[in-house]
Image (cartoon, rainbow, N blue to C red):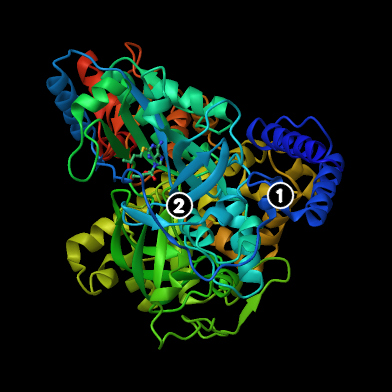
Amino acid sequence: MERAEYDRLVDEILEHDYRYYVLADPAISDEEYDRMLRQLGEVEAEHPDWRRADSPTHRVGGAPTKEFPPVVHQRPMLSLDNTYDETELAEFDRRVRDSLGLDAVEYVCELKMDGVALSLRYQGGALVQASTRGDGVTGDDITDNARTIRTIPLRLRNGLSDVEVRGEVYLPTDEFRRMNEARIEVGEKAFANPRNAAAGTLKLMDPKEVARRPLAFVAYWLDDRYNDGGTQWHALELLQKLGFVVSAHRRLCRSFTEVLLFCEEWEEKRDALPYEIDGVVVKVNRLDFQEQLGYTSKSPRFMIAYKFRARRAETILGEIGLQVGRTGAVTPVAILEPVLVGGITISRATLHNADEVRRKDIRPGDTVVVERGGDVIPKVSGVVLEKRPPTAVPFEFPTTCPVCGAILFRGAEDAITRCENAACPAQVRGRILHFASRPAMDIEGLGPAVVDQLVNAGLVHNAADLYELEPGRVAKLERMGEKSATNLVGAIQASKARPYSALVYALGIRNVGETTARALCQRFRSIDAMMSASMESLMEVEDIGPVVAESILDFFRVEENRNLVERLKAHGVQTESAAAEALEAFQPGKFAGMTFVLTGALERFSRNDAAERIRAEGGTVTDSVSQKTSVVVAGPGAGSKLAKATQLGIEVWDEARFLAELGE
Ligand code: IVH
């Protein structure tokens, strides 16, 4: 092969790289590509002196290094001023406008990628040096590692020759998960989060290993000297033309309100992205304004990071507790040193099951990462192994029930360990609490503490026993007294008037929630009819499939359950459809005709659950506040939606009010 032919082959492969990795629009098959790459490798083996700095063969990684030589940055890599607060963001805008003497300033909003900053230097159009930020003045030369990142161009796509580009290296979320799973499998440490994984990978001494990890790069800064458009917006366009990936989610904002909207939009949508972001970077668009605003000793005055509330935090796991539910499921629970995550204090988190604890090797005494996702339920996402005390020993899942001592069983088909002793006090307690809960028999005053006392005193073994309680006996319990005893017994007796469907839900049949209970009661007008129903007739009910039908049959097959129903019936609990109940299904809900907007963080609900409750009461939930909005439910962190509601004079409820309106 001639030298010119070699050059053509390099250029051709670089072009295919660009189409594949940057544009996601390949022009040739993978086989064809591999064939070209192999050919290139062969030519370079024959003519090592031909190998160009931008040859795609660098992508697979070269020889390992012993150290990363220091690089002094041409201009320091500063840090970024940040805020978690919209008021402070507004102050930033005000400072900018005051300094420039303007009424309004144009901003570019970009997503703040949660990764590692990287500086790239190109000479003669080829990538010659990549360095980490280091202390801002001096970083590490990690060029060989950076060359393996497919979205870092080895050669620029237009005339620019000597330029510096900066951006963020990150690991897409699903790649992060896959990588951690693979690491756990072979007994390696899992990374706490994608950013740690990206940082750890960039610092590997073996570029071949780096090449195996799917890091990505997004560019956000270009040397001003090459920017003929005079704006940050233009810089991003130029970067794209040079062959870089820039964030698709950027916005040129002509007013500060638009900036706020962008921030809020992405705080809400962040979970839908395939990578993690920790905020939005707001930048003054015009470069001459940027220059005018200048720098403090640490950071530019012309940009700011609006950071989202952290979704995770580190804390110490004191011990692993065990919770026995009403179905006998034994769930390990992390008892944590209280920590603030996303505005809410977390002191317990479910660890799901024995496998999960083993897989993540979570040990009492460990420092763990606690996370709140889009949902409210916190989870322990991993262990910070560097902080493990030497005394920490692996957790042994017990073989007997921590409450009643019965041998625990583990189903073959699920990961759940169960106590199968139906008389286990923890299960009895769970079943009674469920029976008394609001959507079930709604018995006021029958909370965890009282139920514990009733069960421990041997007064209550099942729900039917509740209706035989005498005030005199109840009053003898600790912290009870005559008055509360009378009230409690009164509330229990009053629950006999609860509708038949509430009773069916209250029984705690596996897989039968409120909706299913209601549907069942519409089809089977009495509990006797339901108890003798066949598999086929159960499955005729809407949304009931074989699994749910089987749970219902299972429940009524157990003699104790049939006896329970008989006793409840004897006590006068409603076990038939009243005419009124048939009507109830058609009655409009509390929120019929009302339109709601949810904003900010709610403690008791996820957004979805809150919306579901509103819909269940006949209301509508929308995204934006307008004249048509009836109520805005606002939690901590509510921003422009709340402001708009106030401006329009729309009613605003906090979470407590919302709960009260729901009747809780
Ligand atoms: S501009 C003065 N734009 O956030 C530094 N930074 O917390 C100016 N980052 O070191 C950086 N996405 O690593 C900028 N779109 C973006 C960014 C971004 C992520 C990182 C960057 C910076 C850190 C500051």
Closer mark to the observer between disc 1 and disc 2: 1
* Cα distance in 3D space between marks 1 and 2: 22 Å
> Given the image, on which type of amino acid does mark 1 rest?
Arg
Disc 2 crowd rating (10 Å Cα; few below 14, some 14-19, many 20+) is many
- Give residue 226's position: percent from left, percent from top: 43, 26
Q: Say if 191 sits above or below 516 in the image.
A: below
Name the foreground residue: 300 vs 95.
Answer: 300
Instruction: Identify the disc placed on residue 51.
Output: 1
Could you say whether the residue bearing mark 1 is in a helix, strand or loop? loop
Q: Is residue 243 left or right of residue 345?
A: right
Query: Which one is earlier in the sequence, the residue at label 1 or at label 2?
Result: 1
Q: Is residue 361 left or right of residue 250?
A: right
Name the foreground residue: 477 vs 508.
Answer: 508
The structure residue drawn at horizontal position 50% and vertical position 54%, both measured from the top left corner, is 194
Instruction: Identify the disc placed on residue 237.
Output: none
Q: Say if 497 sits above or below 223 in the image.
A: below
The structure residue drawn at horizontal position 86% and vertical position 40%, both measured from the top left corner, is 32
Name the foreground residue: 613 vs 203.
Answer: 203
Q: Is residue 532 visible to the viewer in this orientation of the structure? A: no
- Give residue 257's position: percent from left, percent from top: 28, 19
Could you say whether the residue bearing mark 2 is in a helix, strand or loop? strand
- Would you name the residue on which mark 2 appears? 131
> Given the image, on which type of amino acid does mark 2 rest?
Ser
Q: Say if 70 sits above or below 105 in the image.
A: below
